[in-house]
Amino acid sequence: MKQLLLLGIVILSFFSTAAQAERTCGFDVIQERISQHPNYTNYLTNKNLSYKNFPKSKADTVIRIPVVVHVIYRLNSENISTSQINSQLAVLNKDFRKLNPDTTNAIGWSKADVKFEFILATKDPNGNLSNGITRTQTATDNIGLSNQYYNLVPAWNRDRYLNIWVCDIGPSILGFAYPPNAPGVSAQEDGVVIGSTYFGTTGTAQSPWNLGRTTTHEIGHFFDLLHPWGSDLNPSCSTDDLVSDTPNQNGPEYSCGPRFSCNSTDQMSNFLQYVDDVCMGNFTLGQKTRMRTALYTQRDSLQFGALFEITSLSETPLEPKVLIYPNPSVEIFNVELPKNTLLDKVEIEVINLAGKLVKCETKRGINGLIINIDTAPAGVYFVNVRNGEFSSTKKLIKH
């Protein structure tokens, strides 16, 4: 962890010579630091194994991901408006659904509808109403280039929210993000960090990065995409991004192309390039597969985040005392409740991924309640257990 505390210094020094007219991203530096963690080899082995065993028949459904934007500002100009934040969400929902008109920038390459949609959270982690935006003032300059941003404003529960910090990030870097389950990365810092002048399409957003593509780029990293030249700080034609339909290239390029390297045409319209916002236009089908695989295997709880928004669920300290078993189940499962709970006051709801109630029968058991959902199809459900003193939500898998 001490290595990552130096992240800001490393990023700043690495990019200190970068021209301000060129996009720069801290992801490769983050990858380099992570690679030195003692658990890095096991991390790669386990991740690659989960990707290899990921079922190819996984449903290609639209997944809605709750977002919280943490605005940290020193100057009033950095306290960006809600309309600027909304403009960024609009860009994400076009780019990740292949609804952006500049997909025409991608000539000869696949153009993928990733089927991720992003919504500002309507509930905070405690179940209170929220607009999905926090605002915090600070006296610290360049707060985005160190651990100070998450010490000041820790991430909301990363299992339910995509955390985006918008703050002063210095003149040499536009943004950065952490890959899934990276060793040495705490739950408090896991998310995406974007400079306030590179976020959204209005307000303080500055050309040539005023079309919201910095956030699109970094969220790609958040879901385990690499740059097309791979993650090596010394790229060459032998370094690769592990995606089959993005040709190898020997390093970053900042112009809008065309460009040739590694015996092929580089895909300059890709959202993971370093070109200006106006030149971008697409994710590939291979990148879509990698991002969705990362979601299902590495950030799997995020796919259920929107359900908590729909059902307005909250947790209380008593939640760990509520047990559900067997899980996975076939037709019947048990709900074990805190001692002395009045069973006739307990309400049980079984909810599917569409947010709809599922028919179930409830009977008293020795240590709680017995729930029968034999008519429900196999799949993933949420079981909401509540009475006047507590509420608890558990994920249930039915075979």
Image (cartoon, grey):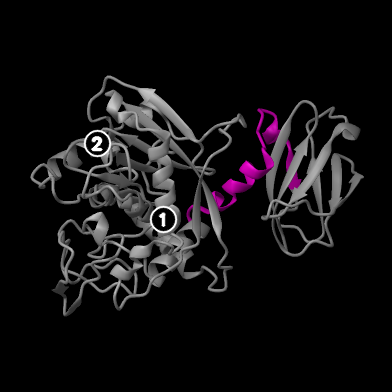
> In the rendered structure, which amino acid carries the disc numbered 2?
Ile
SS for tag 1?
loop
User: Of all residues shown, which one is farthest toward the top?
Assistant: 139
Q: Residue 312: say if magenta.
A: yes
Quarter of the image with the N terminus is: top left
- Nearest-to-viewer mark from 1 and 2: 2
Counting from the top left corner in percent of width and height, residue 189 is at 38, 37
The answer to whether residue 180 of the structure is visible from this angle is no
Spatial CA distance of label 1 from label 2 is 22 Å
Q: Residue at x 74, y 29 (%)?
A: 390
Provide the residue designation for mark 2.
Answer: 169
Task: Describe residue 193's horizontal placement relative to residue 275 as left or right.
Answer: right
Amino acid type, residue under disc 1 in the picture: Phe
Q: Residues within 10 Å of mark 1 (few under 14, many from 20)?
A: many
- Queried whether the magenta region covers residue 347, the answer comes back as no
The residue nearer to you, when weighing 255 against 61, is 255
Near-viewer residue (324 or 173): 173
- Describe residue 43's horizontal placement relative to residue 309 as left or right: left
Which of the 4 image quarters holds residue 44?
Answer: bottom left
Q: Secondary structure at mark 2?
A: loop
Q: Which residue is mark 1?
A: 223
Q: Would residue 186 appear left or right of 364 to someone viewing this image?
A: left
Q: Quadrant of residue 127?
A: top right
The residue segment tinted magenta is: 298-324
For marks 1 and 2 on the same chain, the one whose residue lies earlier in the sequence: 2
- The residue shown at (22%, 67%) is 239
| Residue at 43% from the left image edge and 50% from the top image edge | 90
Instruction: Let me know if residue 76 appears in the view.
Output: yes
Q: Residue at left 34%, top 52%?
A: 40
